[in-house]
Amino acid sequence: MTIILLDLLGLFTFIITLSHAQIDITEPCRYPVAVGMEKEYIPDKNIWATSTTNIARGPQYARLQGYKDDVWDRNRDRGGGAWTAGIPNKEQRLGIDLGYRHVIKGVATQGRRGSYEFVTEYYLEFSSDNKTWSVYTNQYGTPMLFEGNTNDDDIHRNNLDYPIIARYIQFNPQRWHSFISMRVELYGCRFDGEGATFDGKSRVTYDISGPEDYVQSRKDYVKMRFRTNKPEGLLLFADSNQGDYMIVEMLMGRLYLHMDLGSTATASGDTTLKAGSLLDDNQWHELVVSREGRQVNFTVDRLTVTNMTNGDFLQLDLDRMVAVGGMDTFLHPGKRLYTRQNFTGCMENVWFNYMNILKDMRLQEGDEGTRFHVHGAMMPGTCQISTVVPYTFATLDSYLEMPIAPGNRLRIGFHFRPQYRRFAVLARAHAEWADINDHQLRRLLRIQREDS
């Protein structure tokens, strides 16, 4: 807010107040628009469903405002006026391929016009690869049930409190009237992600050691998206010769934030916050650190941990470097750093105090005097790590069985994360395992039970 005082000839004084909304430059979509279901920018081949009543009720007709009596073009085929599922259960899905990744900030639904068929509640699912899917959750991390329609033709729009970044979207109806019938639209922007792939030996550094380059801040803001299948690694490291530091590392699939605004002989400023779990699942996750004075908010995938830093200081002083993806050495006496591995995986849109590190690094590449330096074989651009599709054994009687012809040899390798203290990893039934015998299997199970 800006206040301007105007004094006209000493007779009148006017007070003009200029107010403006704060603009977050890290927000990738400030002005969402319809992505193209209604206007048919999304082709029919990019829309699918788990089942269909008949060819006139196919998924290609699940377009908002789509029905046979088109006042603009009466010859246009609108089919039966909506997508209608052929099986009336909660496992039905309507899927959309947006063509490339979008930031989705809202969705809208309709029923099938003139039929009294509509969906009243649904889940929203999203994916970047059409193989591994996530369900949209609320601020507590539980699946969010969206409110749908109350009749067959009115549009009901839901704006998302937390945007989705994905290429593929699925609607999963949970309650409906008469039949599962839907017309839909999505609202957002094309996602402009500045990313890089780190191989566990590469990193990016920003030099702040110059006499005029140091950082002194009472407010800090760090934001990034990351994806990895490694349970351990260093994501961010920034420190000073005075002992102040900010560190973000992953240990056992969980993120840790270490920060020290200053310590004295009688009061340590060392502070640790931890958030998230199972973050090594090869999916995209979002990290946000915001600090004002001693109050720190540590957010991972919309779940926020808030605490006050230890000590009496309010300012973070940094005068060495800001490192993303790792360090050349992990020997930093006086600083809380547990991991001994650099980050392996992908990062994008890495912001440090409103500086887009990966983008600014690319724009300044080759410039004389740049303070950005790339170490190792970091690969800028889209994420280069392969997709891993996990299997979840949800019940105690779940198992995966692979038939093997007698005499054939089989080599098995896998990573697993148990929920129970007692479990079986492998079982042998009428087959000879080439690389593990009964004694080794019993030893493996005994070791896993002891470690669990």
Image: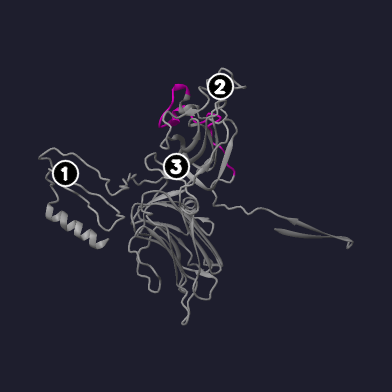
In the rendering, at what x and y percent does residue 25 appear?
57, 52
Identify the disc placed on residue 68.
2
Q: Residues in magenta?
A: 31-56
Residue nearest the viewer, comparing 246 with 430: 430
Residue neighbourhood size for the residue with mark 2, other residues' Cα within 10 Å, grouped as few (<14), some (14–19), many (≥20): some
In the rendering, at what x and y percent does residue 262 appear?
49, 74
Is residue 50 on the magenta stretch?
Answer: yes
Quadrant assignment, res 331: bottom left
Residue neighbourhood size for the residue with mark 3, other residues' Cα within 10 Å, grouped as few (<14), some (14–19), many (≥20): many
Q: Amino acid at mark 3?
A: Phe
Asked whether residue 369 appears in the rendered view, the answer is no
- Give the labeled residue for mark 3: 126
> Alpha-carbon distance for marks 2 and 3?
30 Å
Q: Nearer the viewer, mark 2 or mark 1?
A: 2
Q: Earlier in the sequence, mark 1 or mark 3?
A: 3
In the rendering, at what x and y percent does residue 144 appear?
49, 47
